[in-house]
Amino acid sequence: MVAYKTWVGGTTGAAGDLSEPDNWKPITIRSAAYKWTLSGSGTNEYYLEAIGGGDPGLEEPDNVQEDGTNMTEATAGSLTAGQWDWGDNDALGYSTVYVRLSDSTDPDTKEANYVTYTAIPKAGDHVSIPASSTEDIDDGLDSLSALALGDFIVHEGYSKTIGDENNFLRIDPDYFEFAGSGVAYIDLTTAAISPLITTTATPQTGNRGLYLIGSALTTLICEGGYVGLAWRNGETATVTTVRISGGASVWIGEGATITTVYQTGGDSVIRSAATTVTVYGGTAQTEGDQAVANVNVYDGTVTPNSSGTITTAVVDGGELDLTDTTISRTITNLKLNPDSTLKWDKNTVTVTNWTTPDHPIEYETSEA
């Protein structure tokens, strides 16, 4: 059974522990979807069925609650008041929840949500980190890493921290979305997915709101926030394409393996090698010593401050600023089309081949 698990946090002594069942929102098993049937064994024991009879399709709980209070796990067939068990004590052909309420009555006589259960996420479950949670996630950070989760969504308004600079939350979801406003450290491990980032914490100068790594990411979509992709020393990530838009600020560390950066807004700092960097808006800056095979500037500004060679640069409406540093650099092939801007110092930048523009161009010079 696929379940929807919502982070609550707050259990005394383990408030931020992902592996603590009671830090997850209780799920009702007293509702119109289920019915309770008197067991043929024990005294006043009832087992859970689907409303039409048969297997309710329930996962095994970690804890069961009666009116919000944890019951005691025991053995079906000999339950006393306030106890529960998981099993098949009536030749049902499936396992289910057995309870004996504190007043020994039929659970179906109680109000909706009177009987609930809690469980940590299991494989296939969808995980929600809501704005309503007031707890950091700071323990059990590796407890979900071996699970193939469904969705993992950090919702807008969740303002607490996730992980810390020495401990990443490690998960393997089918879908990941982040819109929190607390600093977060997240490792998407081997998930071959396209994360969506819309908001992050606003960090202090020189820091990031979301530190992200993962070894098999396809397209990282950054629409807002301050993202550091394998930004710190020693961190690694592999991403086929990074897309940057809106007001997103994305810093890509030298440990990242990137094929394409596609930018329509915001700002980026790129310390990794890349096959193609294409900018339609915003500002992009390279740093370090990694090479970029192709740089295309259609609008916005690209500032190549990396000593790594650019094989081909095409400036077609934007600005290529090569004057921000005095580091020696080489562009093998450079094409400057009309309505473009090139800032170039021949003492620090070598252009091997000037490629013929696509259209007639008028050059203007000015005194320094």
Image (cartoon, helix red, strand yellow):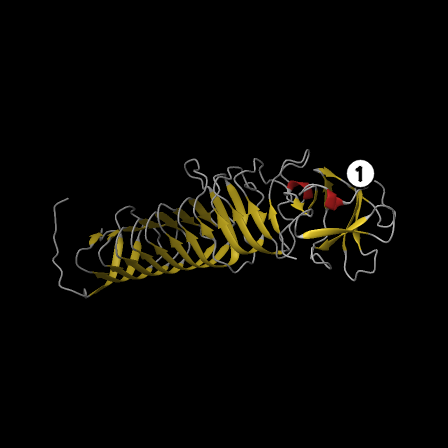
Q: Say which of 28 and 284 sits in front.
A: 28
Quarter holding residue 73: top right
Circle 1 crowding by C-alpha within 10 Å: few under 14, some 14–19, many from 20: few
Is any part of residue 24 visible from this angle? yes
Q: Position of residue 97 (x, y in %)?
A: 76, 51
For label 1, the SS is loop
Looking at the rendered image, the quarter that the N terminus falls into is bottom right
Q: Is residue 300 left or right of residue 81?
A: left
**Left or right: residue 193 compared with residue 336:** right
Query: In this rendering, does residue 20 appear at all?
Result: no
Q: Splitting the image into 4 quarters, where does residue 102 fall?
A: top right
* Rendered location of residue 352, percent (x, y): 25, 63
Quarter-of-image position of residue 274: bottom left
Residue carrying label 1: 102
- Decide which of 268, 53 is in the foreground and name it: 53
How far from the left and from the top, in percent, is residue 172?
A: 58, 55
**Residue drawn at (38%, 46%) of the image:** 248
Query: In this image, 304 relative to 24: left or right?
Result: left
The amino acid beneath tag 1 is: Ser
Q: Quadrant of the C terminus?
A: top left
Q: Measured from the top left, where is residue 330 in percent x and y?
A: 30, 58
Outermost residue to the top: 12
Q: Nearer the viewer, residue 146 or 332?
A: 146
Give the total of numbered labels: 1
Residue lying at 87% horizontally and 52% vertically, measured from the top left: 41
Spot the residue most to the front. 109
Q: In the rendered view, would you say 227 is above or below 10?
A: below
